[in-house]
Image (spheres, rainbow, N blue to C red):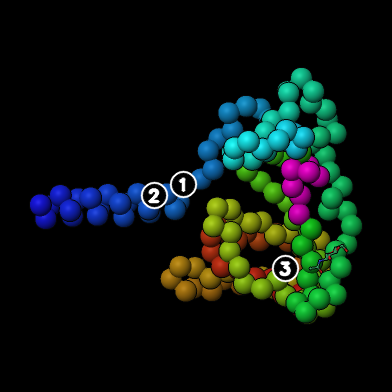
Amino acid sequence: MKTTSFSLQFFLSLALVLGGVKPDPDPLQDYCISDTTIPKFFFINGEPCLNPSLAKSSQFVTSALSNKGNTNNPFGFNVTLTNTDNLPGANTQGLTMARIDLAPFGVVPPHSHPRASELTTCLQGTIFVGFVTTSNRLFTQQLRPGDSFVFPKALVHFSVQC
Ligand SMILES: *[C@@H]1O[C@H](CO)[C@@H](O)[C@H](O)[C@H]1NC(C)=O
């Protein structure tokens, strides 16, 4: 009895650990342009796909990140994201893009993305970025225009304009 209970407990713990590190599955088709006109009868991972024969190059391009966000708020930052409305061709591709505008001394407060790593590229000015590991080790770096920094998946990270 005791052995069975232990085995079950071990299996459940292992399943949780494995589940926590499982990446997004590979897409089952070349692309799945989101069709937001289809009513949602059930929940799926992403938006329903447009008929592939209706695909156009323009569905893979976006200007959503071309405009500066308004940073007039307590933290002095603004995040503009791509999504299935402004970049339908990225639906189900397992990636999103963000433009972050930081006012002088603006801060993107510490946060994490449980299922995604993040790559930050500094385009203008200088930013101080960092992340904390699961064993509380802090990694930081000052970025200048052209520098990129990776925040590993699920780790708490932040950015500060300085
Ligand atoms: C971010 O900028 C956009 C565009 O200026 C604005 O509509 C939005 O309210 C801003 N968000 C915040 C949190 O300040």
- For the residues marked 1 and 2, what is the alpha-carbon distance in whole angstroms? 6 Å
Q: Are marks 1 and 2 in contact (CB under 8 Å)?
A: yes
Work out which quarter of the rendered image holds the C terminus and state it. Answer: bottom right
Q: Residue shown at 49%/68% (left/top)?
A: 133
Residue 114 shown left or right of residue 108 in the figure: left
Residue 134 shown left or right of residue 92 in the figure: left
Query: Residue 123 location in percent, x, y?
Result: 81, 61
Q: On the image, numbered disc 3 is attached to which residue?
A: 143
Q: On the image, numbered disc 1 is attached to which residue?
A: 22
Q: Residue shown at 65%/70% (left/top)?
A: 158
Q: Residues within 10 Å of mark 1 (few under 14, many from 20)?
A: few
Mark positioned earlier in the residue sequence (3 or 2) = 2
6 drawn magenta = no
Image height of 107 relative to 15, above or below = below
Q: Residue shown at 55%/35% (left/top)?
A: 26
Q: Residue shown at 46%/46% (left/top)?
A: 22
Q: Residues within 10 Å of mark 2 (few under 14, many from 20)?
A: few
- For the residues marked 1 and 3, what is the alpha-carbon distance in whole angstroms? 30 Å
Q: On the image, numbered disc 2 is attached to which residue?
A: 18
Of 16 and 21, which appears nearest the observer?
16
Q: Residues within 10 Å of mark 3 (few under 14, many from 20)?
A: many
Q: Kindly tell me whether residue 78 is visible in this rendering.
A: yes
Query: Residue 147 location in percent, x, y?
Result: 73, 61
State the extent of the magenta-drawn residues as a range.
Answer: 81-87
Frontmost of labels 1 and 3 is 1
Residue 60: image quadrant is top right
Query: Residue 153 location in percent, x, y?
Result: 55, 57
